[in-house]
């Protein structure tokens, strides 16, 4: 019997994989979603009163000065013309130049995206690294002291606005204890330890409400699983210890819900960066977006919103792919 | 047992934190130190909502927010002239800086500005008359409200004589020509060579001037890093090696950053509770700048109800300025009865027969009118919102039905231009009432932001702006203030004065000694700033 080459067998297997087909379909549907987001954002920006010219010139600008600057910026063109002009460049990867600073957006975005990306990434890591073990411990002994304390703390954490928490963290850890800096950013290329030191407080300010939410959510789901599911009884009947049942079976099933929540939280987390970056003086996308909105620089806002939309679509796609990894029924298309 | 111990530790830690308090702080007069020291780096924090925003870059001709970015522009460009004052903030005057002097001719229609010899831009090119003239021409064509409102002569208004004299010609005499330099972009001279070589888009990011510092990096509206200009024309200046300007999201995070050591200077703090904490903290020095721009309630006399003088008088009588001063601001800001304040030129504390608070008179007038309803707007800022709320309470007590709203800038401009506004809380005036957009902006007939149409007011404004004689100018402004009061055009409230909050090791004019704000913020003399080790 001859052995056929593994490559030809793998290729159709991969191409025929339900997970890959799913990913491809998601990417295809992302295109109209992104288009719709850009149109909606453009409409909203044009509905906001005033223009970049007024915002830039300030309260002492005369109508003549405003009209002159609007003409210089091309803001006197019809909205449809401006949108089509922007779109025709965006599809070719040219996100345009800021109306206000004349800087190419593509020159500014990468550095700022790196800052925000790091902030969001750290927030996610901190939240999951703390929430998962805490939820497991709480679910292992429901209604005992650790469970009750963690639920009280997480309820309190969800009740505090993240900007209030940020200011409290600065007051305690930066001002009183001087453990961390209150503001500022150190690029990774300059110093890894300096970078992490500077990002600790802002990342924790973003992570804390998340970890409170994830802890409560996961703990509840785990308790439901452990107390209500037949497969748990079966596993116990087979002689598996409680931690083995919890980790190998209940947690695996509960993780689907957690993955969904984490994917959905991406957009909310990105929105939170606007406030956090402002408080901690971080030169990220959030700060750039806020500037763009305040100066009515619709080119900047459109570009950033598009980037956020792409990130959200990709994040949800990753969540779907993770489902396939965790659930063989999805992987083999039997779900 | 372990859990209880942990909880106790947490509580103890909280108590220690709560117990930490600074002792009484120092004001500028108590901060006596030795001679200035060379070296060191300073971090300046600026509110991202105002001066900490420089989205259009730092080219004087294209920085549309130049009036708010005084710190950045002065550090990079210095200035042909600058506003200085005695250590107590008094005797403020405009003095030549990169200019060596000036003289008027032709009845005030021509001014010759002589430049100091030997100044170079940081790119090594000469700071000469040609460079200055080039900049002034460019700035006069710019779209910035920081452009001077000069009426230049039709033919050859900007010329040079030799390499060290710039000649400006005006259509009519302008008394405020020299003082208008310090409030406008013509004061900041950019290197024409660098501009041509880099192109305007790159230049606005990394501009080249002849100021005490040069640009190392510039992340717009985030962080500007400057280093000492080793070839600065003033010997042994600047004192500092490095100046970092950072945008921050408001008074609270800025205050905390100062305490945490991530900043040395915060300009323009307005939150009274934080100011009180800062004053009580011995690690900080709080300096109140002299006031120059009073708040005024503009009344639109072109439409009802304020086309009726009795309605305007009711507003005067219903407004309790002293209650606002004390209740909201703990007496921090002085009251005004005109468009000048004690930190500016031509100030007179009182106007004869000015209508002050009298609730009964206000009620009587409202009854006489058969009722009065007012819509009161303002720009959305912390101070203005608080004052508006207080005014609403006071006017309601007089029977004046009052609705208040605060707008973002775009909305505010639209309100004015639409002409349907009734009352607006705004600021008026500047260090020199004729400099910048001037008082005419609020009270001139031709201004879209004015609520009055009065030839007498227009005449007084014009005469005051054209007369070079300071005593005569003073008289015109006294008459103007009297006219505004007599006709009840606009009650004045208090003269807002910004505060600088710095760490105890920082010193310098505008930082620890007051200098009147040119318009809104103080022009700090960065080449004189220093840090003690």
Image: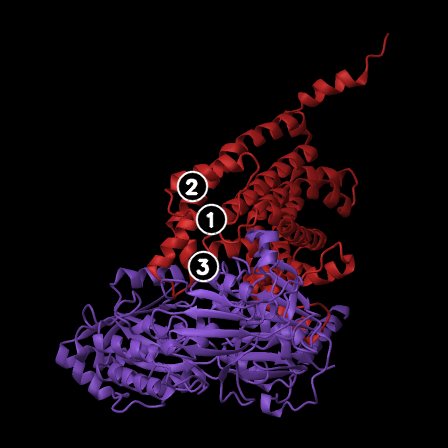
Chain colours: A red, B purple
Q: Is residue B303 above or below residue A323?
A: below
Tag 3 and tag 1 share a subunit: no
- Quick check: marks 3 and 1 in contact, CB under 8 Å? no
**Left or right, residue B107 beside residue B10:** left
- Residue of label 2: A82
In contact (CB < 8 Å): disc 2 and disc 1: yes
Q: Which residue is mark 3?
A: B142
Q: Label 1 crowding class (10 Å Cα cut-off): few <14, some 14-19, many 20+?
A: many
> Chain under label 2?
A
Q: Is residue B52 visible?
A: no
Picture residue at 62% right of the left edge, 35% below the top: A320
Q: Secondary structure at mark 2?
A: helix
Q: Alpha-carbon distance for marks 2 and 1?
A: 10 Å
Q: Position of residue B107 (x, y in %)?
A: 36, 78
Q: Nearer the viewer, mark 2 or mark 1?
A: 2
Is residue A292 among the parts visible in the rendering? yes
Q: CA distance from mark 3 to mark 1?
A: 22 Å
Foreground of the two, A256 or B141: B141
Question: What is the x, y in percent for residue B86?
Answer: 54, 89
Label 2: few (<14), some or many (≥20) within 10 Å? Answer: some
Q: Position of residue A178 (x, y in %)?
A: 72, 73
Label 1 SS:
helix
Q: Earlier in the sequence, mark 2 or mark 1?
A: 2
Which residue bears the numbered disc 1?
Answer: A298
Q: Can you tell which of label 3 and label 1 is closer to the viewer?
A: 3
């Amino acid at each position: 019997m001859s052995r056929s080459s593994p490559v030809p067998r793998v290729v159709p297997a991969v191409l025929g994989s339900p997970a890959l087909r799913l990913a491809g379909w998601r990417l295809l549907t992302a295109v109209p979603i992104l288009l719709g987001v850009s149109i909606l954002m453009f409409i909203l920006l044009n509905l906001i009163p005033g223009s970049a010219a007024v915002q830039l010139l300030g309260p002492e600008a005369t109508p003549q000065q405003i009209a002159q600057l609007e003409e210089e910026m091309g803001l006197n063109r019809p909205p449809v013309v401006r949108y089509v002009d922007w779109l025709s460049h965006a599809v070719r990867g040219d996100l345009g130049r800021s109306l206000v600073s004349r800087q190419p957006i593509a020159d500014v975005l990468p550095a700022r995206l790196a800052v925000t990306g790091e902030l969001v990434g750290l927030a996610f890591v901190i939240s999951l690294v703390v929430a998962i073990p805490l939820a497991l411990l709480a679910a292992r002994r429901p209604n005992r002291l650790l469970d009750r304390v963690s639920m009280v703390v997480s309820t309190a954490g969800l009740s505090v606005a993240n900007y209030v928490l940020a200011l409290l963290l600065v007051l305690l850890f930066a001002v009183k204890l001087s453990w961390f800096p209150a503001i500022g950013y150190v690029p990774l290329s300059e110093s890894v330890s300096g970078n992490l030191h500077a990002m600790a407080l802002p990342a924790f300010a973003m992570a804390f409400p998340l970890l409170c939410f994830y802890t409560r959510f996961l703990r509840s789901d785990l308790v439901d699983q452990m107390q209500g599911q037949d497969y748990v009884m079966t596993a116990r009947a087979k002689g598996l210890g409680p931690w083995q049942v919890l980790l190998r079976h209940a947690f695996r099933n509960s993780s689907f819900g957690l993955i969904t929540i984490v994917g959905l939280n991406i957009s909310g987390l990105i929105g939170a960066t606007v406030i956090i970056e402002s408080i901690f003086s971080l030169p990220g996308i959030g700060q750039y977006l806020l500037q763009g909105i305040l100066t009515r620089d619709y080119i900047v806002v459109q570009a950033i919103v598009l980037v956020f939309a792409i990130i959200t679509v990709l994040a949800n796609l990753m969540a779907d792919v993770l489902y396939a990894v965790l659930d063989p029924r999805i992987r083999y298309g039997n779900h | 047992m372990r859990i209880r111990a942990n909880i106790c530790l947490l509580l103890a830690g909280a108590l220690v934190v709560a117990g930490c308090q600074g002792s009484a702080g120092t004001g500028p007069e108590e901060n006596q130190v030795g001679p200035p020291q060379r070296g060191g780096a300073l971090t300046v924090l600026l509110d991202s909502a105002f001066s900490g925003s420089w989205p259009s870059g730092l080219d004087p001709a294209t920085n549309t927010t130049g009036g708010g970015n005084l710190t950045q522009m002065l550090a990079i460009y210095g200035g042909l002239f600058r506003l200085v004052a005695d250590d107590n903030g008094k005797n403020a005057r405009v003095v030549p800086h990169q200019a060596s002097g000036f003289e008027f001719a032709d009845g005030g229609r021509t001014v010759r500005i002589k430049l100091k010899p030997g100044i170079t831009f940081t790119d090594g090119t000469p700071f000469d008359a040609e460079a200055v003239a080039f900049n002034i021409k460019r700035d006069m064509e710019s779209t910035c409200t920081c452009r001077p409102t000069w009426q230049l002569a039709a033919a050859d208004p900007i010329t040079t004589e030799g390499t060290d004299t710039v000649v400006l010609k005006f259509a009519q005499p302008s008394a405020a020509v020299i003082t208008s330099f310090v409030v406008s972009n013509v004061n900041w001279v950019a290197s024409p060579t660098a501009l041509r070589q880099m192109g305007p888009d790159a230049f606005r990011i990394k501009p080249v001037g002849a100021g005490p510092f040069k640009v190392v990096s510039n992340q717009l509206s985030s962080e500007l890093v400057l280093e000492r200009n080793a070839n600065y024309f003033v010997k042994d200046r600047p004192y500092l090696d490095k100046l970092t300007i950072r945008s921050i999201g408001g008074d609270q995070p800025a205050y905390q950053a100062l305490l945490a050591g991530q900043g040395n200077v915060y300009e323009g703090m307005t939150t009274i509770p934080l100011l009180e904490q800062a004053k009580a903290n011995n690690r900080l020095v709080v300096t109140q700048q002299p006031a120059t721009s009073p708040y005024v309630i503009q009344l639109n006399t072109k439409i009802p109800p304020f086309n009726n003088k009795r309605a305007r008088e009711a507003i005067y009588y219903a407004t309790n300025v002293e209650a606002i001063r004390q209740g909201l601001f703990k007496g921090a800001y002085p009251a005004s009865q005109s468009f000048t304040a004690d930190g500016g030129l031509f100030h007179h504390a009182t106007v004869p027969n000015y209508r002050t608070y009298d609730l009964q008179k206000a009620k009587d007038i409202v009854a006489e009118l058969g009722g009065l309803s007012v819509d009161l707007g303002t720009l959305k800022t912390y101070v203005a919102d608080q004052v508006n709320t207080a005014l609403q309470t006071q006017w309601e007590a007089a029977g004046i039905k009052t609705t208040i709203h605060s707008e973002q800038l775009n909305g505010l401009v639209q309100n004015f231009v639409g002409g349907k506004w009734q009352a607006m809380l705004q600021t008026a005036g500047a260090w020199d009432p004729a400099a910048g957009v001037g008082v005419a902006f609020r009270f001139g007939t031709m201004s879209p932001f004015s609520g009055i149409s009065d030839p007498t007011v227009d005449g007084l404004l014009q005469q005051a702006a054209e007369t070079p004689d300071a005593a005569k100018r003073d008289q015109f402004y006294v008459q103007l203030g009297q006219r505004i009061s007599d006709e009840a055009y606009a009650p004045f409230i208090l003269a807002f004065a910004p505060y600088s909050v710095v760490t105890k090791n920082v010193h310098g004019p505008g930082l620890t000694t007051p200098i009147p704000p040119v318009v809104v913020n103080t022009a700090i003399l960065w080449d004189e700033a220093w840090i003690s080790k």
